[in-house]
Image: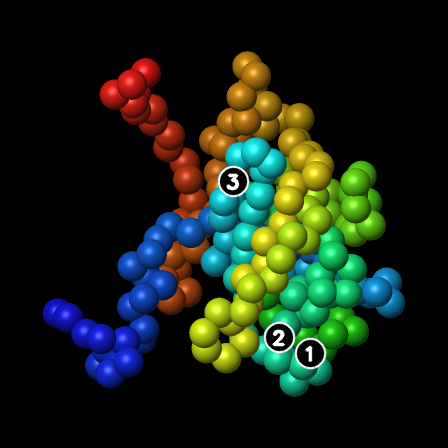
Amino acid sequence: MFYEPKDGHGLPHNPFNAVVTPRPIGWISTRGSDGSENLAPYSFFNAVAYVPPQVMFASTAAKPDRDGTKDSTANIRETGVFCVNIVGHGMRDVMNVTSGGYPREVDEFDRAGVARAECQTIPCSRVADAPANLECRLTQIVQLPGEANFVTFGEVTGVHLRDDCVVDGRFDVTRYQPLARMGYRDYARVAEVFELARPDD
């Protein structure tokens, strides 16, 4: 099968995000200039640089009360900060609750019963029990072709690692089994890890 996206795929569901998998989930927490807080998952998320450490996430939808984007991007535009909370398999259900398209005044921490803690380097809350949190300062927001497609880039200014996930000096993902987004409504968890030596090792 071959198709050109501009002509459609002819399938019952779009296969694009099922092809680019698994994708890590950035559970993004933000605080607006009015002090309101938001927590939402994004699967168009990844790390993009080591020095200085930088991450990105993309928001691809809009809400009528947010002027062409969603709460996360709108809050970051106002304050210039955000926190990436890493999602373990055990947090899948509460993460899913925060994916709803709630009005801007709804605090998803409260809605999902997620414990919060204050970040150290930025004025923002983080998910207290997450395996890791990346505190970030905005570097740029890039508008991509298409309606409501915005990529937010941030420099990581602080990193929290949950103590039980640090084993023999390494951050051990098997301790929390990262949740990954597949296509459609499908998810996966990382339960097995193996190592490959590079040719120049």
Point out which mark residue 66 bears. 1
Q: Nearer the viewer, mark 3 or mark 1?
A: 3
Which corner quadrant of the image does residue 128 belong to? top right
Q: In front here: 199 or 86? A: 199
In this rendering, does residue 194 appear at all? yes
Question: Which numbered disc flags the more N-terminal residue, 2 or 3?
Answer: 3
Q: Residue at x 46, y 77 (%)?
A: 146
Residue designated by label 2: 69
- At label 1, the amino acid type is Arg
* Up-down relation of residue 170 to residue 104 (above or below): above
Place of residue 198 in the rendered image (x, y in percent of width and height, measured from the top left) = 29, 23
Label 2 neighbour load within 10 Å: few <14, some 14-19, many 20+: some
Distance of label 2 from label 3 (alpha carbons) = 26 Å
Q: Are marks 1 and 2 in contact (CB under 8 Å)?
A: yes
Instruction: Identify the residue position indicated by label 3 in the image.
Output: 49
Relative height, residue 122 to residue 199 (above, below): below
